[in-house]
Image (tube, helix red, strand yellow):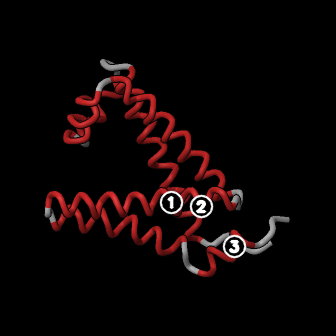
Amino acid sequence: MRQRPITVTIVAGLLFATAAMAAVAGCSLLLPGTVLDRLWDLNKPGEEFFRALGRSVGVPLLLLGAAMLAAALGLLQRRNWAWWFAVVLFAIHVAADVVGFVINRDWLKSARSILIPAAVLYVLTRPPVRRYFRQERQ
């Protein structure tokens, strides 16, 4: 079996981190008044946005966190579905940030928000990574 490309491990790490953030955000919305609320100090605009949507938005955030966790584990286990999930996830992220740029015209924020997921999408679609997921697992 071919060695896993380092980029796959890095993308899995990003998915693990975002899964944790989604889970913490979901739990803090569903269970307000806990120590988790202090983490919102790191992202006040995010807190305002999610709190305005209501407590119940915590459930989809937990589901999103679970999906990202599954995708991260799937990437590390060389699952083709996990590669597709990651590609679609990052493509949606890029598209949403492009729309956000068109709406708000904030060059600095939009550049960062678009370039990072676009770079991840780029490395996921490079031939070595595609070959890694196309080959049969043994």
Binning the other alpha carbons within 10 Å of mark 2 as few (below 14), some (14 to 19) or many (20 upward) gives some
- Residue 125: x percent and y percent? 54, 74
Q: CB atoms at circles 1 and 2 under 8 Å apart?
A: yes
Three-letter amino acid code of the residue under disc 2: Trp
Q: In this view, does 28 lie to the left or right of 52?
A: right
Q: Nearer the viewer, residue 126 or 7?
A: 126
Q: In which quarter of the image is residue 124?
A: bottom right
Give the residue at the far right of this rendering. 138
* Residue that label 1 marks: 88
Tell me how far mark 1 sits from mark 2, CA to CA: 6 Å
Tell me how far mark 3 sits from mark 1, CA to CA: 18 Å
Binning the other alpha carbons within 10 Å of mark 1 as few (below 14), some (14 to 19) or many (20 upward) gives few
- Residue 52: x percent and y percent? 23, 30
Is 80 located above or below residue 2 in the figure?
Answer: above
* Residue that label 2 marks: 84
- Residue 105: x percent and y percent? 14, 63
Element type at mark 1:
helix
Three-letter amino acid code of the residue under disc 1: Val
Q: Is residue 33 left or right of residue 83?
A: left
* Residue that label 3 marks: 132
Residue name at image x 50 percent, y 53 percent: 15
Precedes in sequence: disc 2 or disc 3: 2
Q: In this view, does 86 lie to the left or right of 38?
A: right
Residue name at image x 41 percent, y 31 percent: 26
Element type at mark 3:
helix
Is 59 located above or below residue 5 in the figure?
Answer: above
Q: Quadrant of residue 43?
A: top left
Q: Nearer the viewer, residue 32 or 51?
A: 51
Residue name at image x 41 percent, y 42 percent: 21
Is 132 located above or below residue 105 in the figure?
Answer: below
